[in-house]
Amino acid sequence: MTNTPQTSPDRKGLVEVFTGDGKGKTSAALGVVLRALGHGFHVCIIHFMKGNFPYGEQKMLAQFSNVTLAVFGRTSFVDPNNPEEEDRKEAKRALEAGREAMLSGKYDLVVLDEVNVASAWGLVGLDDVVKLIEDKPEHVELILTGRYADRKLIEIADLVTEMLMIKHPFDEGVEARAGLDY
């Protein structure tokens, strides 16, 4: 019998964090997702604070039978200085969905997209995110994305990459572009 990615005896799931003020955190996570799909992994992606916006990656990934997508949040942006109660409820629902997926035994890779921001803005508790990481099954790869990753998350992660913004077209008035930026 051939081992699946999930049951391979030599596979240890890591905790990866993609953070920083530069572009590319979600894109890096999606690169790992694409690679994992190429090896037959089962993937769950939980999007925090992304509402029902037409992100291109969601349209494409929904076509794969071994990918589960769950999107949480309102379609409007969260005010970090004054988040609404609905923002908190949606973020807590997202974290719980991520926990359930991670513990379900169904997935090799779980991505919590923008969870770092949700934690930094107080939509979910940092201790709750830490507890989720501590409860991660050995075989599950877990990716946390978003700006403002807390020092605690950085310390307990196995891999941390910080995207550094050096130059961005947004500063010159170029708006986000369908198919390239979302």
Image (spheres, rainbow, N blue to C red):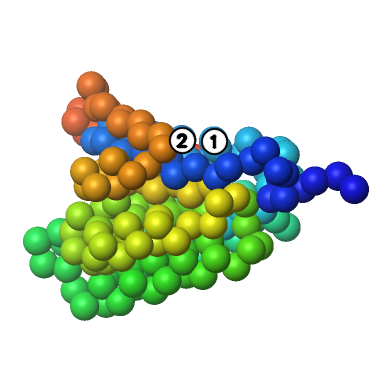
Tag 1: amino acid: Gly
Q: Which quadrant of the view contains residue 31?
A: top right
135 vs 43, nearest the viewer: 135
Residues packed near mark 2 inside 10 Å, few (<14), some (14 to 19) or many (20 plus): some
Task: Tell me the number on the disc at residue 140.
Answer: none
- Residue reaching furthest to the front: 9
Could you tell me which residue is drawn at 64 percent across and 41 percent down?
Answer: 11
Where residue 160 appears, as percent x and y from the top left, is 36, 34
Where residue 152 appears, as percent x and y from the top left, is 24, 47
Could you tell me which residue is drawn at 58 percent across and 42 percent down?
Answer: 12
Task: Tell me the number on the disc at residue 28.
Answer: 2
Residues packed near mark 1 inside 10 Å, few (<14), some (14 to 19) or many (20 plus): few
Q: Are marks 1 and 2 in contact (CB under 8 Å)?
A: yes
Could you tell me which residue is drawn at 19 percent across and 64 percent down?
Answer: 122
Tag 2: amino acid: Ala
Can residue 126 be seen from the camera position used here?
Answer: yes
The image shows residue 1, relative to residue 95, as above or below, that is: above
116 vs 77, nearest the viewer: 116
Where residue 180 appears, as percent x and y from the top left, is 46, 36
Q: Secondary structure at mark 1?
A: helix
Q: Is residue 91 left or right of residue 40?
A: left
Could you tell me which residue is drawn at 44 percent across and 61 percent down?
Answer: 135
27 vs 10, nearest the viewer: 10
Q: Which quadrant of the view contains residue 8?
A: top right
Q: Is residue 38 left or right of residue 131?
A: right
Where residue 101 appears, as percent x and y from the top left, is 55, 65
Q: Quadrant of the C terminus?
A: top left
Can residue 57 be seen from the camera position used here?
Answer: no
Residue identified by numbered label 1: 31
